[in-house]
C-alpha cells in the first residue's frame, strides 16, 4: 500500500502539495486527476522517491520512500528519458541491465503487440512510437507498483488506443497497482478503479469511480468540469 | 474503438446489460464460454476489475456460472434465461409506459399508437 501522511512539498516558495493524507490500496488502477500545475506529478515523484517531501512521510508497503524504492516502483516520466543514439533494442537491453526485475519475454510480447521495430534508433522514432517504447519499458518490469505521469498526453487517438490496450493486456492487477496522472479523464475513465482529485496542491476527493458515477449520476469527466469550474462551493477562508 | 458507455451509470452494470442483450439475441448461447476477464477487458476497453465485477453480478443473478479453473459460462438453465427475457421486456415496457403516462397519454392511446407504429414499420419493411 502507498501511504502519504501529512505530506507537503514546496519548490522554493512555491507550494506544490499541501498537507496530503492519502492511502492508495493495491490491485487497482488509480487516476490522479486535476488541472495542469495542481500537484499531480509532484505526487507521483514523491511516491517514486524522485523528490523528497518538505514535511510528512511517504511509505510504500510500510517502508519510507527513498531512492531504493525504485526496486518496487516503475516510473514513467512525462519527459523523454532515454539515450537518443540507442536503438529500441539497445534501450531495452539497457533497461534490462539496470533492473533485475525486467522481464525480457514481456518486453518482446509488448514489442510485437505495439508493432515497434527494435532495430530503429530511438531518435528516429515518431512521437507516438517513442511513447510506445516508454510504455514498454515501464510495463516490462515485474514490480508491484507502476506509476505513469500523463501516459496519453499529446498523442493521437490511435496511439492512445494502443497504449490503453497495452496497459490492460500487460498489467497484472492481482500483483500490481497502477497509479497514473491524467487530464484526459474521458478516455481513461473506463480504466480507472479509483480517482484522486487534486486542486491547487490539495486532495479534494478520493473516490471509487463506479460509486461516484452512481451517486453523482454523471461521469468523472462531467463531475470534474463542475467541480473545477467552481460550480460547487470552494471552502472560503473565514 | 469500443462502444461508448453512458456517463451516468456504473460501467460494470452497463457491461452486464450488454452481455444480457447478447444472450437474448442468441449471440451467446446456453453453455457458451464468456471471454476471459482480460480478453473482455481488452475488447471493451475497461479495467479488468470492472469485468470481474460484471461477471460476479451476472453470477449473482444466476445468468452465468464460473467453473473453477475453466472460466465463466452462460447458464444452461433455460428457465432462468427465459425469465431474464421476461424481466428485460417488462422493464423496458415499464420505462416506455411511464414516459407516455408523464406526457398524458392514456392506456388506449398508448396501445393504438404502438400498433400504428409497428404497422408502419412492417409496411416500410415490405416496400424495401
Image (cartoon, coloured by chain):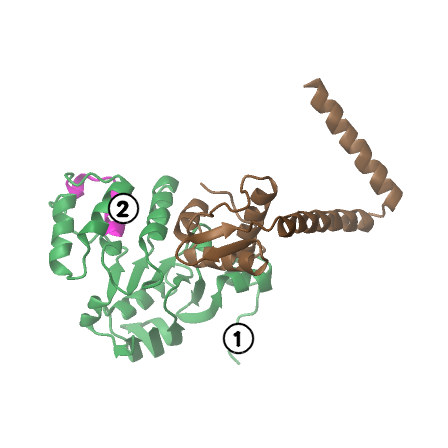
Placement of the N terminus of chain B among the 4 image quadrants: top left
Placement of the C terminus of chain B among the 4 image quadrants: top right
Image quadrant in which you'd find residue A70: bottom left
Q: x, y percentage for residue B18?
A: 56, 47
Q: Tag 2: Cα neighbours inside 10 Å, few (<14), some, or many (≥20)?
A: many
Mark 2 or 1, nearer chain start: 2
Left or right: B23 with respect to A75? right
Count of marks, rendered view: 2
Residue at 12% over, 53% down: A94
Chain identifier of the residue bearing label 1 in the image:
A
> Residue at label 1?
A236
Chain identifier of the residue bearing label 2 in the image:
A
Point out the stretch of residues depicted in magenta: A121-136
Q: Residue furthest top?
A: B127
Residue at 30% over, 80% down: A55
Circle 1: element type: loop
Circle 2: element type: helix
Q: x, y percentage for residue A212?
A: 54, 63
Amino acid at each position: 500500500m502507498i501511504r502519504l501522511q501529512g505530506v507537503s512539498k514546496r519548490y522554493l516558495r512555491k507550494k506544490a502539495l499541501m498537507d496530503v493524507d492519502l492511502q492508495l490500496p493495491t490491485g487497482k488502477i488509480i487516476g490522479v486527476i486535476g488541472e495542469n500545475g495542481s500537484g499531480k506529478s509532484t505526487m507521483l515523484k514523491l511516491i517514486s522517491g524522485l523528490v523528497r517531501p518538505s514535511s510528512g512521510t511517504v511509505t510504500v508497503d510500510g517502508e519510507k520512500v527513498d531512492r531504493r524504492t525504485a526496486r518496487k516502483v516503475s516510473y514513467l516520466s512525462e519527459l523523454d528519458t532515454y539515450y537518443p543514439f540507442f536503438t529500441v533494442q539497445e534501450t531495452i537491453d539497457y533497461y534490462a541491465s539496470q533492473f533485475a526485475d525486467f522481464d525480457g519475454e514481456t518486453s518482446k510480447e509488448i514489442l510485437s503487440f505495439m508493432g515497434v521495430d527494435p532495430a530503429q534508433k530511438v531518435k528516429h522514432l515518431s512521437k507516438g512510437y517513442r511513447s510506445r517504447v516508454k510504455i514498454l519499458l515501464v510495463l516490462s518490469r515485474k514490480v508491484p507498483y507502476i506509476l505513469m505521469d500523463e501516459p496519453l498526453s499529446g498523442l493521437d487517438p490511435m496511439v492512445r488506443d494502443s497504449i490503453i490496450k497495452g496497459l490492460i493486456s500487460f498489467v497484472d492487477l492481482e500483483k500490481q497497482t497502477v497509479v497514473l496522472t491524467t487530464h484526459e479523464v474521458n478516455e481513461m475513465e473506463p480504466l480507472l478503479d479509483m480517482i484522486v482529485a487534486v486542486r491547487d496542491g490539495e486532495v479534494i476527493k478520493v473516490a471509487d469511480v463506479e460509486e461516484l458515477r452512481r451517486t453523482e449520476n454523471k461521469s468523472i469527466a462531467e463531475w470534474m468540469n463542475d467541480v473545477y469550474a467552481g460550480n460547487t462551493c470552494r471552502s472560503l477562508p473565514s | 474503438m469500443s462502444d461508448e458507455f453512458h456517463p451516468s451509470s456504473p460501467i460494470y452494470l452497463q457491461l452486464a446489460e450488454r452481455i444480457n442483450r447478447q444472450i437474448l439475441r442468441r449471440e451467446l448461447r446456453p453453455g457458451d464460454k464468456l471471454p476471459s476477464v482480460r480478453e473482455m477487458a481488452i475488447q471493451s476497453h475497461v479495467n479488468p476489475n470492472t469485468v470481474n465485477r460484471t461477471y460476479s453480478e451476472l453470477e449473482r443473478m444466476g445468468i452465468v456460472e464460473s467453473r473453477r479453473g475453466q472460466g465463466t459460462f452462460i447458464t444452461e438453465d433455460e428457465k432462468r434465461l427465459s425469465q431474464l427475457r421476461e424481466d428485460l421486456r417488462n422493464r423496458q415496457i415499464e420505462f416506455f409506459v411511464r414516459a407516455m403516462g408523464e406526457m398524458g397519454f392514456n392506456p388506449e392511446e398508448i396501445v393504438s399508437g404502438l400498433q400504428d407504429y409497428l404497422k408502419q414499420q412492417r409496411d416500410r419493411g415490405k416496400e424495401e
